[in-house]
Image (cartoon, rainbow, N blue to C red):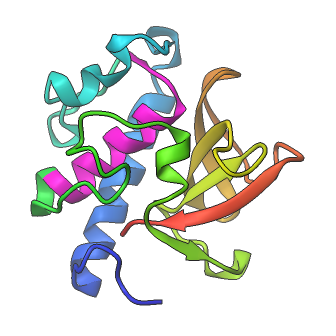
Amino acid sequence: MSSVSGLSKQHRAVAREIIMHGCHMMLNHPSIIHYTQGSLRWSGIDQHKRISHGQFPYYGDCSSTVTWLLWNALHLKYGVRDLVNGEHWRAGYTGTIATHGKRVHHDSNIEVGDLILYGPAPTYEHVAISMGGRKVFSHGSESGPYYLDMDYRGDRGPTRRFI
């Protein structure tokens, strides 16, 4: 599968490492991370929270959290435009994520940083980010953040790639 972001193979590998680091930071601090669908959900990007500086948002929902991870890996590192929601890294939800990126057709091709959608099509209701090995980082309506099996929900939908 070709690169959605236009990055070289080496830069895509670095972007995936950034995402893994961000997921692990958040998984190590679950008591200070809170679910919200209010305006604070975009605080990670609004306040320029940088994984490279050991920072992460304390508030978010599923779509803003995965967008923040990809913003760090793609935009901050390489200046890539918003391929995730098409909103200049300022807005979006699971439904906009579902219409962007490139579809990953087989589970064997899922890579770190791919987004897994859950719930009914076409807008879905939840998104998690692949951490590899059929595991996902999930933060959303079920709270979290959590490190879970990719099939932790019975309503798994398509996978979208942005790196």
Q: Which corner quadrant holds the C terminus? A: bottom left
- Residue 12 shown left or right of residue 28 in the figure: left
Q: Residue furthest front?
A: 122
- Is 106 displayed left or right of 85 in the figure? right
- Percent across and percent down for residue 51 are 24, 39
- Residue at the farthest bottom position: 1
Q: Residue at x 32, y 34 (%)?
A: 91
- Depicted 24 relative to depicted 116: above or below: above
Q: Residue at x 60, y 76 (%)?
A: 104
Look at 55% across and 44% down and name the residue there. Answer: 95
Q: Is residue 42 above or below residue 127?
A: above
Toward the right, the furthest residue is 154
Q: Residue 155, how many percent across, how many down?
A: 85, 47
Q: Is residue 131 above or below residue 120?
A: below
For the point 12% across and 63% down, the residue is 78
Q: On the rendered structure, is 143 left or right of 60? A: right
Residue 59 in the image: above or below residue 72? above
Residue 95 versus residue 89: which sits nearer the camera?
A: 95
Residue 17: give x, y in percent of width and height. 34, 60
Total marks shown come to 0
Determine if the magenta segment contains residue 74.
yes
Q: Which residues are magenta?
A: 59-75
**Within the magenta stretch, is there residue 112?**
no
